[in-house]
């Protein structure tokens, strides 16, 4: 219960939604509601429901080479979408199926998972490994790479904007496969550590690699050194060991009540290894 | 503010506060099968169907479901629901019973969308429900039995039990 909320708006356009938000600094956008409903905060005084804005589209545009997922699309609707079967060999759907529990995925949205960037988010490392772009409305339609989500200048921008969707480029050449690994204390607990990884191969050679680590316990980040080291090489057992070691050395992890720094370092090594082995088995 | 919900096949109008949680509204209005557990979306005791999809009512605002269809355990009165109830009793899948309305909602949702689930799919469907008594084994068995009956068209067996 948000006891101080006195107004509930259902705007009919992005412009109207933004105007309502700009008029009241203690107003909050509402999509699935799973994040905000857990807040017992006294701060919100107005809620702006985005449900009528039709931001839940899902479009695979092969001509433009992109996948567009609307911000209010429920996570489970992405998991169960037949149009996405086989996308990056199922990486996106398999990964998102590990987010929360079934009822939470039925209510939670992709956009909401990004606007409220919890450090333990599974959605963010999954999308970071796909080079996703955030689409947002800031009086005009804008876009920015998801990897810049935590940039100092972007957070204030996003606070006064509406995330409208996520865009992912379809693999243009070669074959892309991926693996998402999650370590949590129980089936329904949030991640203590998570790793998203995608590899694009052409003629047996890696042309593009992405690896992102989240719940470090700080925000998810890409391991660019690892990604560069994989380019131009072939996935084999030696490379898997070497890469897992490099990932454990370069991932900036620390301790929290769930896991010590040393344990996280060892876990990054193991999860990077598992992800790469998973991808290798898919290639073979 | 006023909202209209089709709840258990009946259109009803409610006056709600703009920041009110759906769980609080349902319990206030007498739908007491909807239990308050963790109030954090973890335990599934407050599970309801929203337009046929299982969701935790503690993570939804009442205003969000304006114009939608809500089903609580009180509104599940068809053959599938009766079979689930009876099978849960028969195999001993109920102990203290607090989680059971939520577990039955999840089970019903699963079998409605997937009448022939694997054990893995049953476990995945129940991953939003906490039961501290049974260890889930009997609940999974009950769902498997109902699914098997559905697949085999064994309605006779179900009717005998009810």
Image: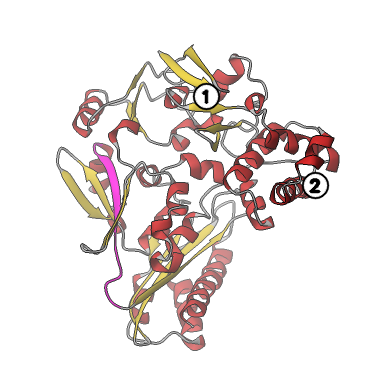
Q: Residue at x 36, y 41 (%)?
A: A72
Is B114 on the left or on the right of B162, as rendered? left
One can see residue B94 in this view:
no
The span shown in magenta is: A160-173
Residue at the location (24% across, 38% down)?
A161
Quarter location, residue A28 = top left
Residue A1 — which label? none
Mark 1, residue position: B22
Q: Report whether A231 appears left or right of B110.
A: left
**Distance CA(mark 1)–CA(mark 2):** 30 Å
> Do the residues under discs 1 and 2 have CB atoms within 8 angstroms?
no
Position of residue A160 measured from the top left corner of the image (x, y, whole percent)? 24, 36
Quarter of the image where one finds residue B107: top right
The x, y position of residue A194, in whole percent, is 50, 60
Q: Residues within 10 Å of mark 1 (few under 14, many from 20)?
A: many
Instruction: Kindly state the secondary structure of the residue where label 1 is placed.
Output: helix
- The answer for which chain carries disc 2 is B
The residue indicated by pointer 2 is: B138
| Depth order, front residue of B24/B51 | B51
Residue A2 magenta:
no
Task: Please give left or right for residue B26 compared with residue A280 in the image.
Answer: right
In the rendered structure, the answer to whether residue A105 lies left or right of residue A136 reads right
């Amino acid at each position: 219960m948000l006891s101080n909320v006195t107004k509930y708006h259902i705007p009919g356009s992005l412009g109207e939604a933004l105007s309502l938000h700009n008029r009241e600094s203690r107003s909050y956008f509402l999509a699935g509601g799973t994040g905000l409903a857990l807040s017992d905060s006294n701060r919100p005084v107005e809620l702006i429901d985005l449900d009528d804005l039709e931001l839940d589209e899902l479009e695979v545009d092969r001509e433009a080479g992109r996948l567009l997922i609307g911000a209010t699309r429920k996570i489970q609707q992405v998991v169960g979408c037949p149009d996405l079967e086989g996308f990056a060999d199922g990486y996106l759907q398999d990964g998102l199926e590990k987010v929360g529990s079934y009822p939470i995925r039925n209510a939670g949205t992709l956009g909401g998972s990004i606007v409220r960037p919890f450090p333990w988010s599974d959605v963010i490392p999954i999308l970071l490994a796909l080079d996703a772009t955030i689409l947002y409305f800031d009086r005009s339609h804008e876009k920015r790479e998801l990897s810049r989500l935590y940039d100092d200048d972007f957070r204030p921008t996003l606070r006064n904007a509406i995330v409208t969707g996520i865009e992912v480029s379809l693999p243009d050449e070669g074959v892309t496969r991926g693996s998402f690994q999650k370590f949590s204390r129980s089936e329904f607990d949030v991640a203590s550590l998570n790793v998203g990884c995608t590899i694009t191969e052409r003629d047996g050679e890696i042309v593009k690699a992405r690896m992102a680590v989240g719940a470090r316990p700080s925000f998810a980040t890409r391991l660019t050194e690892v990604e560069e080291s994989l380019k131009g090489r072939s996935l084999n057992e030696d490379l898997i060991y070497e890469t897992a070691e490099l990932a454990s050395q370069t991932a900036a992890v620390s301790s929290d009540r769930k896991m010590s720094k040393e344990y996280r370092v060892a876990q990054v090594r193991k999860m990077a290894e598992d992800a790469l082995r998973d991808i290798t088995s898919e290639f073979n | 503010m006023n909202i209209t919900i089709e709840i258990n096949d009946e259109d009803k109008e409610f006056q709600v506060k703009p920041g009110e949680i759906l769980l609080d509204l349902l319990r206030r209005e007498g739908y007491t099968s909807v239990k308050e557990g963790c109030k954090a979306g973890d335990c599934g005791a407050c599970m309801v169907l929203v337009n046929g999809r299982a969701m935790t009512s503690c993570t939804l605002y009442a205003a969000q479901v304006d114009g939608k269809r809500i089903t609580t355990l009180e509104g599940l009165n068809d053959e599938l629901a009766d079979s689930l109830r009876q099978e849960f009793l028969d195999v001993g899948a109920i102990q203290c019973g607090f989680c059971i309305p939520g577990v039955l909602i999840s089970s019903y949702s699963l079998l409605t969308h997937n009448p022939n689930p694997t054990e893995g799919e049953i476990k995945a469907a129940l991953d939003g429900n906490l039961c501290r008594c049974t260890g889930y084994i009997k609940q999974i068995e009950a769902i498997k039995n109902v699914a098997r009956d559905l697949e085999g068209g064994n309605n006779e067996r179900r009717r005998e039990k009810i």
